[in-house]
C-alpha cells in the first residue's frame, strides 16, 4: 500500500462530524467511552463503534482500568492535525460540496454539480 493510499484511508476514517468531535475531545486528553458519550450526547454504542474504527486505523489506543476503558490518541501530532484543520476550515471558504450528505444520499434540488466523491 502506498503512502497516498494510507492517507486516503486515514482521511476517510476521520472524515465524519461525530468522529471529528471525538478526536477534538481526545486532543485534550484521555477519556473513557461514557464521558465521550455524555459530552457529545450520543449513545455509548455509537461512540464505541467510532473508537473501534480509530483503533483499526491506529489513531487511538486504549487501556482498561477496573470497569472502564480509556482512550487516547496514539500520537500528539494527531491533536495538532485536528486543531489545525479546524482553524484552516474556519479560514477557508466553506466547501461547495452540498449534494452528498453524510448518509451517502444525494441532496435533491440544489442544481449544483457534485464536487466531492461519495465516501
Image (cartoon, grey):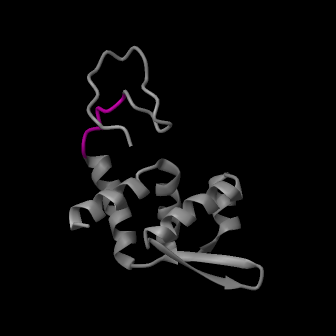
Dominant SS in magenta: loop
> Is residue 95 located in the magenta-colored stretch of the structure?
yes
> Image quadrant of residue 65?
bottom right
Tell me what residue is drawn at x 42 percent, y 26 percent.
106
Q: Is residue 49 above or below residue 69?
A: above
Left or right side of 63 for 38: right
Q: Position of residue 83 (x, y in %)?
A: 37, 63
Q: Position of residue 31 (x, y in %)?
A: 61, 73
Q: Bounds of the magenta span?
A: 92-98
Tell me what residue is drawn at x 43 percent, y 23 percent.
107
Left or right side of 111 for 60: right
Considering depth in this image, is 31 or 47 the residue closer to the camera?
A: 47
Q: Is residue 39 above or below residue 80?
A: above
Considering depth in this image, is 54 or 17 the residue closer to the camera?
A: 54
Q: Position of residue 4 (x, y in %)?
A: 22, 61
Left or right side of 21 for 64: right
Q: Position of residue 101 (x, y in %)?
A: 45, 33
Q: Is the C terminus in the top left, top right, bottom left or bottom right quadrant?
A: top left
> Is residue 115 located in the magenta-colored stretch of the structure?
no
Considering depth in this image, is 102 or 119 the residue closer to the camera?
A: 119
Q: Is the N terminus in the top left, top right, bottom left or bottom right quadrant?
A: bottom left
Task: Tell how many labels.
Answer: 0
Amino acid at each position: 500500500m502506498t503512502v497516498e493510499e494510507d492517507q486516503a484511508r486515514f482521511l476517510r476514517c476521520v472524515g465524519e462530524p461525530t468522529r471529528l468531535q471525538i478526536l477534538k475531545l481526545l486532543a485534550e486528553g484521555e477519556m473513557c467511552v461514557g464521558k465521550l458519550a455524555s459530552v457529545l450526547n450520543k449513545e455509548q454504542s455509537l461512540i464505541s463503534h467510532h473508537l473501534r474504527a480509530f483503533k483499526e486505523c491506529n489513531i487511538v489506543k486504549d487501556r482498561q482500568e477496573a470497569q472502564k476503558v480509556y482512550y487516547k490518541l496514539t500520537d500528539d501530532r494527531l491533536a495538532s492535525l485536528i486543531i489545525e484543520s479546524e482553524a484552516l476550515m474556519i479560514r477557508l471558504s466553506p466547501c461547495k460540496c452540498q449534494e452528498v450528505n453524510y448518509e451517502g444520499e444525494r441532496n435533491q434540488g440544489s442544481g449544483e454539480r457534485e464536487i466531492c466523491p461519495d465516501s
